[in-house]
Amino acid sequence: MSGTNDKIKQEALRLGKQAKVAARLLAPLSSAEKNRTLLLMAGKLEAQSTFLVEENNKDIEFAKENGVSTAVLDRIALDAGRVHAMAKGLREVVALPDPVREVTKMWRRPNGLQVGRMRIPLGVIGMIYEARPNVTADAAALCLKSGNAVILRGGSEAHHSNQAIGAVLRQACAETRVPQDAVQVVQHKDRALVNELLQLEQYIDLIIPRGGEELIRAVVANSKVPVIKHYKGVCHVYVDADASLEMAERICFNAKVQRPSVCNAMETLLVHEAIAAKFLPPMIAKFQTAGVEVRGCEKTRALAPGIKPASDADWTEEYLDLILAVRIVKDMDQAIDHIERYGSEHTETIVTTNYQKSREFIDRVNSSAVMVNASTRFNDGGELGLGAEIGISTSKIHAFGPMGLEELTTTKFIVFGDGQIRE
């Protein structure tokens, strides 16, 4: 057993060392060189579509044999259309501005020194994720464009798919100046290797876990490397007394029903008591027609007899399903108190025509995205104009909310003088 553990430790160390060297070689490359590699990657993914689908079929068969749910099977599955979508995603990253070497600020000191801040890559990123094999391509593209080497460890349920995609991406690197080890996909299935990677603080600069709450908490508990956290998305919509009820109905329905299995879907609806009797009965009926199971507070159940009672556990639940918790509140203060107590600092929306209330809601609610008169579903890198994202952070350090290219960089100080010395 000790021999096996030693082999795993050495494998993790090899990955870390290779990534560190690759990061140094990747950082100074021009935008043109990185974009050329990304375009080559996209072309190779499409050219190898049949191979990728065949490898994916191995994962699908294994998943079926192990009784994986239909929803997970859908997340794992690749076909020609999804391969094309991966390639399209890489080409979209090419079109994004390169943040590396951007000077974000410059000022002159009284002694004549010019001081500035310039964007630089973080270095080496470790990405630990579940299910969707497209994340392999997406994460590699975003890391490469932002000048970071990446170590990718996907879930065992998509092992063959991830290995195949990684091999194609590395083929493209081999034909350009981008070092192959800028993109490494972990081949070892043993979870012990993940724990070894989490200890490599001298080689890995940031860990980004993407998956269920259990995975993320395990990574945070065991990592010596800084971790970007996204435990869960307990997102709220608060319908204010001054809301347009027609607008509120559209927003609430979209936030819950359009795609309930994602982290920016609404999980709890808060409604001001002044409009609850008029708004909730038809709103709940519309939800139920769409197959939503509604769980309500005592006041809500009085307006809509027959719905299930909401327990304390419902207020903190990320259902990721057609289930919704509903609570009637006496005012905006109580709505904000509820969000602070039970929320996950992901996404919150207020529906109101009152400008002062909207400004106060924005100022007082400390989630990664706070919205006025818009669906929570807009908390997404593409929808917010970042182009693409590697994940959504509910940590406040160093990034908060969707993480695009800019969030995969940091800044260093640059100083220009003409002979100044410190007296």
Image (cartoon, rainbow, N blue to C red):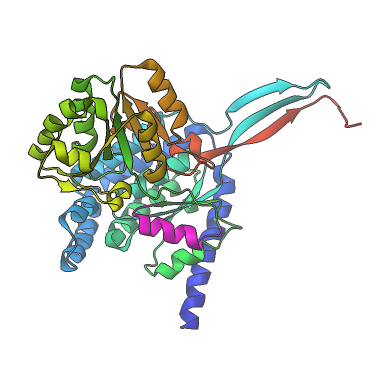
Marker count (numbered): 0
- Left/right placement of residue 178 relative to residue 246 reads right
Answer whether residue 397 is visible to the viewer in this image: yes
In the rendered image, residue 276, in percent from the top left (x then y), is placed at 21, 29
Q: Which residues are magenta?
A: 210-224
Q: Residue at x 48, y 57 (%)?
A: 220
Please, which residue is most extreme toward the right here?
423
Which corner quadrant of the image does residue 105 belong to?
A: top right
Q: Residue at x 58, y 53 (%)?
A: 21
**Who is closer to the viewer here, 260 or 192?**
260
Q: Residue at x 43, y 26 (%)?
A: 362
Magenta span contains residue 309? no
Which corner quadrant of the image does residue 20 belong to?
A: bottom right
Answer whether residue 382 is visible to the viewer in this image: no
In the rendered image, residue 25, in percent from the top left (x then y), is placed at 57, 46
Image height check: is 168 above or below 30? below
Magenta span contains residue 216? yes
Q: Residue at x 56, y 51 (%)?
A: 205
- Left/right placement of residue 267 relative to residue 282 reads right
Image height check: is 191 above or below 281? below
